[in-house]
Amino acid sequence: MEFDNNKPIYLQISDSLCERVLSGELKPEDRILSVRELGSELGVNPNTVARSYEKLTDAGIIYTKRGLGYFVAPGAKEIVLEAQRKDFMENEWPRLLKRAALLDINLKELL
């Protein structure tokens, strides 16, 4: 995974896991790597991964089974989809519209 210096690593890890849920690579009840395993794989501090997992747990995207590890929650895809659609509509879409207007591109051309 290549990290972007302009965004906290824990958020990038969270986003990556969310993308894997949306793509269907991770399905409900799939076990995900432990904090230490993922930290080792990515070459980051386990505390950074723990922070990502805490964020995802709080959002209801993953959960823990005591003694077994972390798993993708039932309904995770819907939760991620709703959150990312909201973010797109509130943040990305207005920027795209503004950029299209500056470049004199109308909506018909975009579609």
Image: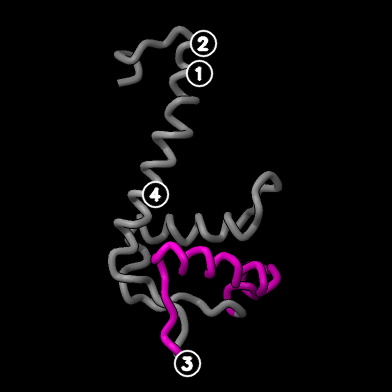
Q: Secondary structure at mark 3?
A: loop
| Residue at 40% from the left image edge and 46% from the top image edge | 84
> Looking at the image, is mark 1 or mark 4 earlier in the sequence?
4
Numbered mark located on residue 67 in the image = 3
Q: Earlier in the sequence, mark 4 or mark 3?
A: 3
| Residue 51 part of the magenta segment | yes
Marks 3 and 2, the one that precedes in the sequence: 3
Cβ atoms under marks 2 and 1 closer than 8 Å? yes
CA gap between label 2 and label 4 equals 28 Å
Q: Secondary structure at mark 4?
A: helix
Query: How far apart are labels 3 and 1 at the CA level?
Result: 50 Å
In the rendered image, the residue lying farthest to the top is 104
Q: Could you tell whether 101 is left or right of 12 in the image?
A: left
Label at residue 62: none
Disc sitting over residue 102 in the figure:
2
- Quarter the N terminus occupies: bottom right
Q: Identify the secondary structure beneath mark 2.
A: helix
Query: Could you say where residue 107 lies in the image, as x and y percent from the top left?
Result: 33, 15
- Amino acid carrying label 3: it is Gly
Q: Secondary structure at mark 1?
A: helix
- Where are the magenta residues, as a range? 37-66
Amino acid at the residue labelled 1 = Arg
Q: CB under 8 Å between callouts 3 and 2?
A: no
Query: Which amino acid is tagged 4?
Result: Ala
Reading the image, the residue beneath label 1 is: 99
Which is more N-terminal, label 1 or label 3?
3
Q: 51 or 72, which lies in front?
A: 51
Can you identify the residue that label 4 sits on?
A: 83
| Circle 1 Cα neighbour tier, 10 Å, few/some/many (<14 / 14–19 / ≥20) | few
